[in-house]
Amino acid sequence: MKNSNQIDGTSYYMLPCGRQIEDFIWYRELNFQMGSALKYRYRMGKKDGEPMEKDGRKIGHYTVYMASHTVEDVAFFDEEVERLHDEAMAWDGDEKKLRSYVMPKRV
């Protein structure tokens, strides 16, 4: 199977391991909202012409959405996005080492 680097080599989505952030999102099985929040967190300050504040607002949109549909609050999801960002930064690119993400219980 081709990884996303063979499809789209966008530098502001490139992880230190040489894979794209979407590979991490795919193999962690993140839902749309968490994957989108992580994508915007990862590219924050890297995309030319996009102010960091704009990406921050997008992250906030998704964390508020997740908080409104689960038993957790916005602070929990802000911390989760940061934790997943750190995990993605440390990932060595081996998808077999990643486990599926479990979202908090829905309300």
Image (tube, helix red, strand yellow):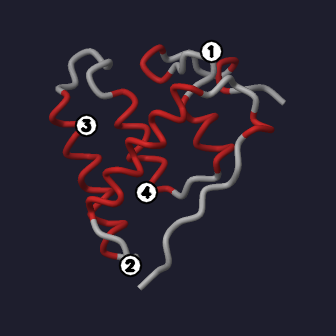
Q: Taking 77 as reference, is 10 above or below it?
A: above
Name the kind of residue labelled 3 in the image.
Answer: Asp
User: Upstream in the sequence, badge 4 or badge 2?
Assistant: 4
Q: Are marks 2 and 1 in contact (CB under 8 Å)?
A: no
Q: Is residue 59 above or below residue 64?
A: above
Q: In x, y percent, where is residue 11?
A: 47, 14
Kindly identify the amino acid type of the residue bearing the numbered disc 2: Val
Labels 2, 1: front one: 2
State the mark number for residue 55: 3
The span from disc 2 to disc 1 (Cα, nearest Å) is: 36 Å
Circle 2 crowding by C-alpha within 10 Å: few under 14, some 14–19, many from 20 = few
Q: Nearer the viewer, residue 107 or 12?
A: 107
- Residue drawn where x is 44% and y is 43% of the image: 83
Of labels 3 and 4, earlier in sequence is 4
Residue topped by disc 1: 18
Which image quarter: residue 95? top right
